[in-house]
Image: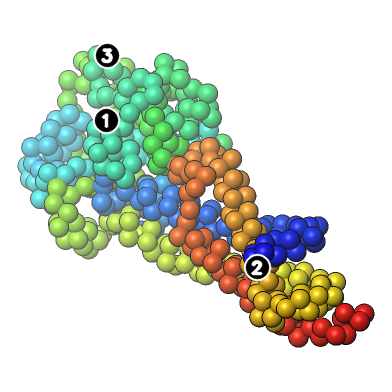
Amino acid sequence: MSLIQIAWRNFCHRSLSSSLTTLSLALGVGLVVLVLSIFGIITEAFSRNASVGYNLVVGPKGSALQLTLNSVYYLSQPIENLPFTEYMEFFPKAERADMVRRYGGDPALGERDGVYSGFVAGGYVIPLALGDYYGEFRAVGTTPDFFEKLRKGPNLDEKFSFREGRPFKDFTKQNGYFEAVLGSRVASEMGMHAGETFYPTHGDPEGKGHGQGFKIVGILDPTGTPNDRATFVNLEGFYLLDNHSRPLTGDEIIVENEDWKQRDPDHKPLTIPQREVTSILVRNGNLMFAPGMQNKINEGLQAQAAAPVGEIAKLMTAIVGPLLKALLAITLITCVVAAVGVLVAIYNSMNDRRRDIAVMRALGARRETVTSIILAESLMIALIGGVLGWFLAHLAIWIASGYIEDQTGVQVTLFTTSAYELAILPLVVGLALLAGFLPAASAYRTDVGSNLAA
């Protein structure tokens, strides 16, 4: 009979004690794996959503991290707003002149290229206007370019797709200003469908409601990004809501275009001096120009530019890094406690085994053989408990996978693993073997004659 078979029979002979020890070890390992897996999911959710095409976010002076969280993840609160003329600095002269013609403003704005236009050639610039909510979800004013230029995930080949309807478009006789697209999670939780109307609130979820509603023309497929929990509205309609107009001082030069009155007599667009943007998403045509443009923007008085990937990396280093060290310390302590449990269980059983060990020795078993059997039993408990704990932790994550995907956009399966948890099982096995040496040494020193006589 092999040593493993003898160890297994010892395990089964003391089935209650062995099972409780194994279960205790499994629960400890499961807790550790669960914590590390959740940590990995949160880290991935932040990292993979740091960019969906753009490489810089431009906003008012202040905290670059707050700007990133607000504009990329729709968390935190906006710092302030930028005047629309700052957004125009990313465009060449022809497009600036067209904006003046379309919206009304100082004709001099269209007589030169924007300060940053050379850096963006071949890329794109998308404005965001924040400040309203639909329920607990952010209402984001933007342009149709958001759905045409950006991608729905880190894989830049994936364009936005729609579960229902279409993206909103620039104003035409068929398409008004007040059109909206809902993220998949917003539509699910609010129970809305294409063709229905919703009314955003001003300032926060409990703020005053706007009298003007937006017609839902599209609902996005799940993207696995923060866009799933955002409501996107046409920027022109966003500007026309109450308290969204920048007050005029009376010194502005405004040349209005009468063409707008013919297109929509009931709604006159805001002029350029009345417009503001919360932030601007920028994709450089050549990414080599990004550092130069970022430095130039940051040297100015009004705006700052932040690289979302860099800001999230800093967040991970400053906050998540120490948290990971604490989790790893807890992991080590939990594994040591589990190993001590194995030691106590086997050592306490040694008094009951002394006669069995003495019989084995009398039949010719060497001291090393007896020691190996005890270590094999310790190893068996560690392997069964470790594997069972890993499976229970991942089973719990798999059961909650739908909720995790809704909240973070990260898809998890039964076998999704994090880098750190792969070291748990070897660590537990190693500690269990160490814990088995004390009862193994006790078995090694068992006196044959006295125990047979007893």
Of the image marks 1 and 2, the number of the one nearer the N terminus: 2
Residue 139 image point, x, y percent: 42, 35
How dense is the environment of label 1, judged by Cα within 10 Å: few (below 14), some, or many (20 and up)?
some
What amino acid is found at the position of numbered circle 1 in the picture? Answer: Pro
What amino acid is found at the position of numbered circle 2 in the picture? Answer: Leu
Select label 1 or label 2 by which is in front.
2
Placement of the N terminus among the 4 image quadrants: bottom right
What amino acid is found at the position of numbered circle 3 in the picture? Answer: Gln
Q: Nearer the viewer, residue 326 or 104?
A: 326
Which image quadrant is residue 237 in? top left
Residue at image location 41% in from the left, 19% down from the top: 194
Say which element carries label 3.
loop
Residue at image location 38% in from the left, 64% down from the top: 314
Select label 3 or label 2 by which is in front.
2
Q: Nearer the viewer, residue 34 or 284?
A: 34
User: In the picture provided, is 131 more to the left or to the right than 384?
Assistant: left
User: In the picture provided, is 154 more to the left or to the right than 382?
Assistant: left
Residue at image location 70% in from the left, 72% down from the top: 374
Say which element carries label 2.
helix
User: Which mark is drawn over residue 3?
Assistant: 2
Of the image marks 3 and 1, the number of the one nearer the N terminus: 1
Q: Nearer the viewer, residue 222 or 299?
A: 222
How far apart are the alpha carbons under marks 3 and 2?
82 Å
User: Which mark is drawn over residue 144?
Assistant: 1
Select label 3 or label 1 by which is in front.
1
User: In the picture provided, is 197 more to the left or to the right than 336?
Assistant: left
Of the image marks 3 and 2, the number of the one nearer the N terminus: 2
How dense is the environment of label 3, judged by Cα within 10 Å: few (below 14), some, or many (20 and up)?
few
Q: Where is mark 3, residue-wise? A: 174
